[in-house]
Image (spheres, coloured by chain):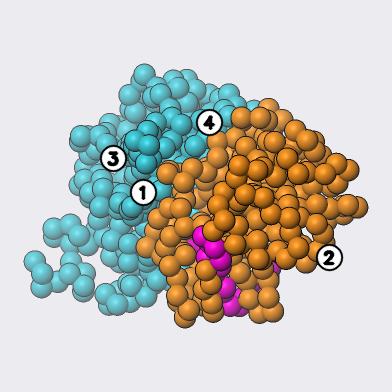
């Protein structure tokens, strides 16, 4: 059951170019892997969406890429600070897959540590744009890591049930190779619970709210080039 | 009475939030279905947010056949229907289809900044709707009018029963690439930055008419709500704050009671029009 609660920051850890924010769980439920939470961004008007990265006992942890004013404010939280968190929201990954393979790009690896636990640590391929960013692969031991200019799709094996999260071009490329893949998309979001109609994406010829019908969509997700990605230089980042 | 601003809450995806209001205001309904504007549709600014949703809605027929019955089943709450269109006949045609047994009131969205406006004046649209329904008609006005009091008098003369003040203001935000963030370019500006503008609009309309007023624009706290009542609002609606805080209605309600009590008032309604000359409450005596 989703709820909003003000909880304490219990830890802040740098993970390569990203920041892992660990929060006291309070009365919040972790939800299913791939579901997300709206986290208050101190000093900003709107909260920001984050899929749950890890759910240690009594905690919720989110991986933050400080690319805009909101994500930077959240990455700047300190132990003892209190922030409002609302969730879990949206639809996560289906876990009834026979031969799972996790495919992630950049900050898109965020939901995988929690997902990997649920799937009993399946193989994973992670792509990053730099060696510094790739340090975040430590969150997913045993994952195969590639760094630009090598792309995850160049090392993607066949015959796997792909669960992917990453930038839009990566998801498009993954889907071209694995049409049945479960893909976790991203869009600028004001509310996370269906109120603002800001996060619509085209699915099957109509615009649907990603926060209500996603963020994980099946093979019928947004058509090639149909999704305007959350832009680091604008929108709500 | 606490409401949501139209388009800031979906009572079907969040009935538990709607139930904390005194009435639910729907997203604007137009005669034909509208997909709305392409993404990107929202952008945060330093002191507010822009939206360019573009009146996305299922259209009048599906709204009447599906949405309205679903709302009735989900809520047990008075439903105000926000009505929009591109001509006076669009508005009136929807009004005449609304069943007074199912709908508590109509809010006429005369001021959406994200679509082209109807050619008729606000007064003409209200007059057409007045002829089409017995339901209470609330005219939602733009704060961008140079003399909003004059618009208020015009819609009152045409048969409006109340005013909804204010809609968003048109705004623009650029990304780091110096291009508009929103796909439509401009959008409706809401949030904390709108609050002084809403206070000024309610203040002006209270001096121009005696119509009841739903005050809205940047309300985040109970004190914000009390200030709207003090300039002349009889009702308060929550908008952008609902995006970040779905618990805002209950919180604002209890903060409002506390704020009234801090001013020595039995309840918040006693602060009505306290900001106007000649109106005295415990909290503002001695300052005049």
Which residue is located at x 76 percent, y 63 percent?
A142
Chain assignment, label 4: B
Same chain letter for marks 3 and 4 = yes
- Disc on res. A191: none
Q: Which chain is cyan?
A: B
SS state under label 4 = loop
Q: Chain of mark 1?
A: B
Distance between mark 4 and mark 1 Cα atoms: 20 Å
Give me the C-alpha separation between circle 1 and circle 3: 19 Å
Q: Considering only order in the chain, which callout, 1 or 4, is on the residue closer to the N terminus?
A: 4
Range of the magenta residues? A15-40
Q: Nearer the viewer, mark 2 or mark 1?
A: 2
Residue linked to disc 4: B38
> Mark 3: few, some, or many residues within 10 Å (few <14, many ≥20)?
many
Viewed as shown, does residue B13 lie left or right of B138? right
Q: Which residue is mark 2?
A: A120
Looking at marks 1 and 3 on the same chain, the residue that comes earlier in the sequence is marked by 1
Query: Closer to the camera, B220 or B108?
Result: B220
């Amino acid at each position: 059951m989703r709820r909003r609660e003000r909880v304490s920051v219990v830890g802040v850890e740098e993970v390569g170019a990203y920041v892992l924010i660990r929060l006291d769980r309070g009365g919040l439920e972790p939800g299913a892997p791939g579901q997300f939470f709206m986290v208050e961004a101190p000093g900003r008007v709107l909260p920001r969406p984050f899929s749950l990265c890890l759910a240690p006992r009594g905690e919720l942890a989110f991986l933050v890429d400080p690319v805009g004013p909101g994500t930077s404010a959240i990455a700047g939280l300190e132990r003892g600070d209190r922030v409002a968190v609302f969730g879990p929201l949206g639809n996560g990954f289906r876990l009834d897959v026979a031969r799972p393979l996790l495919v992630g790009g950049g900050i898109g690896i965020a939901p995988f540590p929690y997902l990997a636990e649920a799937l009993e640590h399946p193989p994973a391929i992670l792509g990053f744009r730099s060696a510094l960013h790739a340090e975040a692969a430590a969150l997913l031991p045993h994952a195969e890591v590639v760094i630009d200019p090598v792309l995850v799709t160049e090392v993607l094996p066949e015959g796997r049930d792909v669960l992917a999260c990453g930038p839009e071009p990566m998801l498009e490329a993954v889907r071209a190779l694995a049409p049945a893949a479960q893909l976790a998309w991203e869009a600028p979001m004001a509310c996370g619970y269906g109120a603002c109609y800001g996060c619509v994406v085209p699915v099957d010829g109509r615009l649907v709210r990603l926060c209500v019908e996603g963020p994980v969509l099946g093979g019928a997700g947004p058509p090639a080039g149909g999704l305007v990605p959350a832009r680091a230089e604008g929108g709500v980042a | 009475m606490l409401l949501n601003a139209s388009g800031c809450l979906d009572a079907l995806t969040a009935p538990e939030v709607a139930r904390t209001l005194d009435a639910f205001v729907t997203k604007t309904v137009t005669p034909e279905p509208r997909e709305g504007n392409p993404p990107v549709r929202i952008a945060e600014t330093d002191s507010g947010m822009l939206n360019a949703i573009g009146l996305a809605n299922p259209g009048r027929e599906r709204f009447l056949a599906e949405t309205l019955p679903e709302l009735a089943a989900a809520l047990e709450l008075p439903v105000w229907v926000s009505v929009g269109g591109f001509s006076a006949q669009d508005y009136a045609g929807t009004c005449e289809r609304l069943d007074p047994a199912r709908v508590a009131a109509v809010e006429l969205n005369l001021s959406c900044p994200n679509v082209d406006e109807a050619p008729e004046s606000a007064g003409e649209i209200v007059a057409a709707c007045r002829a089409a329904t017995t339901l209470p008609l609330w005219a939602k006005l733009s704060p961008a009018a140079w003399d909003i009091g004059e618009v208020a008098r015009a819609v009152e003369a045409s048969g409006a029963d109340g005013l909804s003040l204010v809609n968003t203001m048109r705004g623009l935000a650029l990304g780091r690439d110096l291009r508009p963030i929103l796909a439509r370019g401009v959008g409706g500006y809401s949030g904390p930055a709108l609050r002084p503008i809403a206070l000024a609009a309610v203040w002006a309309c209270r001096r121009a008419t005696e119509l009841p007023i739903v005050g809205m624009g940047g309300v985040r706290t109970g004190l914000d709500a009390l200030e709207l009542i003090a300039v002349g609002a009889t009702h308060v609606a929550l908008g952008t704050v609902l995006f970040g805080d779905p618990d805002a209605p209950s919180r604002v309600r209890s903060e409002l009671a506390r704020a009234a009590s801090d001013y020595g008032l039995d309840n918040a309604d006693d602060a009505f029009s306290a900001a106007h000359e000649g109106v005295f409450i415990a909290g503002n005596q001695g300052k005049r």
